[in-house]
Image: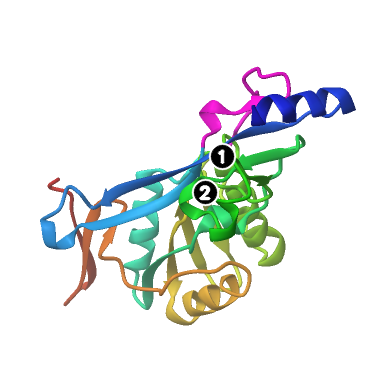
Amino acid sequence: EFRRVLFRSCRRNGETIHISEIMPICYEKHSELQPEFRQLRARLVYRGDACRTEKGVKATYREVKSLPAMVHSINIVFFYGMRPGNVVQISDAIKAYLQAPLKTTVPTWAIIPKVVWRDEWHSRFRKVACPLDRALYGHQTAGDDWFDYFDNTLVTKMKGKRIEQFPSVWWFKDWEVLVATYVDDVIAAGPEQGVAKFWETVRSHVSFDDVTVPGRYLGRDHLVVELNKGKKVFMSMPD
C-alpha cells in the first residue's frame, strides 16, 4: 500500500524516483582465520537489486567505471616502500561510502528498516522512507561515487597524479609518495616524512582509522624486516 500511494503521487506529479529498502546484514569478518581473530559485524545496506521506479519497474543506472588497485599494483607500492629510507603504511577510510555523496540524477528514496526506528515511530507509522543522499553500500553506483570522491580529493585537493594503466594508484611528486587503494583500504609508501605528510593531509579531507604498518592487508599477511642489505617484506596467504 505504501508504494502504491507513493507511486500514484509521483505519476500524478510527473516525478521520477528510485526507491528500495535498507536491509540489515550480519557477517563474520576474517572467517577464514582462527576463532580468536574473527569479528562479528553488522551493517545496513541499500537493496540496489530490488530498486524500482515510480512505475514499479526495475531501476536502471549509469555505467560504472571505477577499478580497485590490482595485486601487482599493491606489490609495487610494497617494493617502493622497501627502498632505503622509505616506509610503507596502511589505513582504511571510516565508513568510506557514507563520506561520499550519491551522485545519481534521479531522486532516490530508502525505506528504513524497523530495527533502527525511533521508539515513537512504531505507534505512528507503518513504513518510513527518507531521501538517500549518501553513497550507501548496496546502491549500484555507490562504489563509483566513493571512488570519484576519493580520487577528487587526491588529485584536485592534494595535487596527486594518476598513474596511467594502473587503476587506483597515485603519485605525489612533492612528497615522493606512491599511494594505492583497494576500495577503502589505502596503502602509502615513500620517505617517512613524505608519508606522514600524506596521511596528515588526506585525513583533513577524509576520515581514516589509525595508520599502521602492514600486517594483514587484503587477506594477505605481511612482515617487514630489516636485514643487513636492507628491508624485505615476507608475504603469506595460506588461507
Rendered location of residue 234, percent (x, y): 18, 60
- Residue at 12%, 47% in the rendered image: 238
Residue 54 on the magenta segment: yes
Residue 98 in sight here:
yes
Residue 216 relative to residue 77: left or right? left
Q: Which residue is mark 1?
A: 66
Name the amino acid type tagged 2. Answer: Ser
> Could you tell me which residue is drawn at 53 percent across and 59 percent down?
119
Q: Which residues are magenta?
A: 47-66
- In the foreground, 82 or 67: 67
Disc 1 vs disc 2: Cβ atoms closer than 8 Å? yes
Residue assigned mark 2 = 168
- Measure the alpha-carbon separation of dots 1 and 2: 8 Å
**Quarter containing the N terminus:** top right
Q: Residue furthest front?
A: 123
Front in this rendered view, residue 178 or 47: 47
Question: Is 34 situated above or below 139?
Answer: below
Labels 1, 2: front one:
1
Q: SS of the residue at dot 1?
A: loop
